[in-house]
Image (cartoon, rainbow, N blue to C red):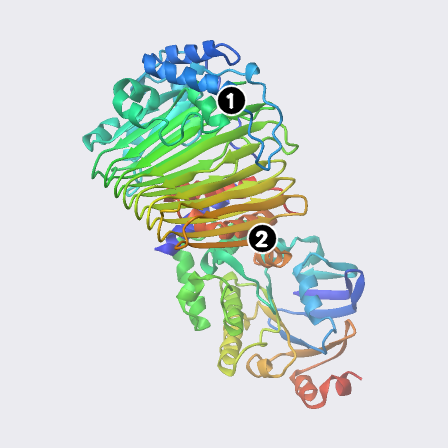
Amino acid sequence: MSEDIEIKDQAAREAAAKVAEYEHGWVADIEQEYGPKGLSEDTVRYISAKKDEPEWMLEWRLKAYRHWLTMPMPDWAKLNIPPIDYQNAYYWAAPKKKDGPKSLDEVDPEILRVYEKLGIPLAEQEVLAGVEGARKIAVDAVFDSVSVATTFRKELEAAGVIFRSISEAIREYPELVKKWLGRVVPMADNYFAALNCAVFSDGTFVYVPEGVRCPMELSTYFRINAENTGQFERTLIVADKGAYVSYLEGCTAPQRDENQLHAAVVELVALDDAEIKYSTVQNWYPGDAQGKGGIYNFVTKRALCQGKRSKVSWTQVETGSAITWKYPSCVLNGEDSVGEFYSVAVTNNYQQADTGTKMIHNGKGSRSTIVSKGISAGHSQNTYRGLVRVGANAEGVRNFTQCDSLLLGKTCGAHTVPYIEVRNPTATIEHEATTSKISDDQLFYAMQRGLDTESAVALIVNGFAKEVLQQLPMEFAVEAQKLLGISLEGSVG
Amino acid sequence: MLQITNLHASVADKPILKGLNLTINAGEVHAIMGPNGAGKSTTGYVLGGRPGYEVTEGSATFNGQDLFALDPHERAASGLFLGFQYPVEIPGVSNLQFLREALNSQRKFHDLPPLSGGEFLKLAKEKAGLLKMDMDMLKRPVNVGFSGGEKKRAEMVQMGILDPKLAILDETDSGLDIDALRICGEGINAIMRKPDKAVLLITHYQRLLDYVKPDFVHVLAGGRIVKSGGPELALALEEGGYEGVAA
């Protein structure tokens, strides 16, 4: 029943209201080994060797690296990005233990404790013994540069689903990986994607075979722990004909004064009648109230809706990172294929976000929906940037876009930059946009009923973002609601 | 219960209340009437603690506490409910969610455990029934798309659920048709006509007072109470207007 859901969510918000600052800012004391400092062909070779990769993979990386050297840093986003010293960072940091697949009992107990503290269930029996009706979630735990565990392998294999760290997949399923890696996001696509191709260290690979509905939610939990280290993960999800998979992604990092770079590439492929639902709750350390520290989150996410009637739905809740540069997109090649983008981006203090989507309609009858909710507070800048393109041969395309911005206070900014390129006259494109402020009337009304300022703000903001939050799987929706409240604490009054 | 002494208050540096005195005891219903601009709504906002409504002189005690030392949500938790003349919309937040959160926040203030989902729904159903409001309405976002009358009835459901000690109802009768007026009036009686509770009605007209019989009627003009009496004063006002009575 809907009211029960609301009620559970509310309990979560109440719990969240107690937490006054970034909850995941602690560092675990784990002995780690580092690759060479700085970026060079040697670094690329070191990573490839560490991962025991085949020759073709090393060549691919080196090609990307050489291309990256020729590329300028992109400057078109509404972001103020300080120069990044690529030579003053590590590209490989891993817990000191042998690399490679491990069963849970082999994983360093210290690392297991990290995930426990983050509330991520790695032990399968914990989930199994959980509350009745609680859904199983398989987890790939990526700790700095390596995947430390993937869970529920056997059960997934029985269904034919491959759920592996990408390093394992490169060794175990080279043909499958080779076929799709870089197919959706070519290595020369953009500056950060090229960098990722050269130095990516781990990530997740999922293959759901023809006609299979993945029996549980899949997820990857990214944790940056090491200092001065960039995280470059790579995720590839392929849903074969008629397959379905729902995938969740979460991320946190310690509180540090230095900025850390996170440059990921995510590629999704959906064949005929396949559906992929990809949900993100991004909670990287956003920096302190003065804007010191925080993660630079420069991510390329793209889906190829290659098959007829294929569907990809991106849902993202972005609360963290000092700077976010991220445009989860859909290339809608298949006839009657469907792309969706639901986004909530919150910025507070000195955070900057330039985020949105691209919907590239090449297939006849392809449809897309974009719902973006931007919330800005403090001195932050929050930009929606989106492209809807309709190719000349794509008949009967439909798009609906809605961009709403909510401002808290007088020193923040909200910007909406929609690009619409239509080359076929049969297209129907709709764009709606609103900008509003939390009104004093709303705040006083909620407070007169007994809510303190922060609970009142959290309530109003969650209402504003509801359309997007309700797209998330339940477990994530609760976490996302908590985060919205926490991220905006101290922003009013 | 409520004692207001020599209250002066300004909005944007403009003095509105100029020496208001009023005492309300438990078990009483008071009505404040008065011409437009007399300071009726301001009285409600000042007591509720609305930002921008500045107390420049005087005091108010509520059950022995200095009311002006409390934040708005603390005043609410202490039992002060303000029924809004223009209830505010909160898109995306259902009435049930809003009220459960508000109620549990008030309970927390008194170190009481939160109500469970089941307990809360039972309470909400009962109070909605008093106001003849469908539960489906309460699943909709707070006041969004509600008619004027629905908003006022929803305010009374909120009052029933939050169960205050003192309700200050600002023009609850405006925008109501005859049936809704009767339902709201009966609702106020059922919820608030109790020995340990009190009501302050702010209104322009006698018609609400036909249902909720006041013990005291006050005329507010120029920021202070210029005349007080029993229910007959409201009838005299209806007959002769403010000019005749307040002069």
Q: Look at label 1 and name its amino acid.
A: Val
Comparing labels 2 and 1, the label whose residue is closer to the camera: 2
In the image, A152: left or right of A232? left
Q: Position of residue B190 (x, y in %)?
A: 50, 73
Count the marks: how many? 2
> In the rendered image, which quarter contains the N terminus of chain B?
bottom right
- The chain letter under disc 1 is A
Quickly name the residue at label 2.
Answer: A435
* Sequence-first disc among 2 and 1: 1
Q: Position of residue A300 (x, y in %)?
A: 45, 32
Where A282 falls versus A175 (above or below)? below
Where B11 falls versus A310 (above or below)? below
In the image, A277: left or right of A458? left
In the image, A371: left or right of B210? left
Q: Nearer the viewer, residue B232 or A292?
A: A292
In the image, B131: left or right of A336? right
Q: Which residue is at the far bottom? A: B239
Q: What number is the disc on residue A27? A: 1
The residue at the point 64 percent across, 47 percent down is A492
Disc 2 from disc 1: Cα separation: 39 Å
> Is residue A399 visible in the rendered structure shown here?
yes
Where B212 falls versus A181 (above or below)? below
Q: Look at label 2 and name its amino acid.
A: Thr
Label 1: few (<14), some (14–19) or many (≥20) C-alpha neighbours in 10 Å: some
> In the rendered image, which quarter contains the C terminus of chain B?
bottom right
Q: Which residue is at the far left? A: A158
Q: Nearer the viewer, residue A32 or A271?
A: A271
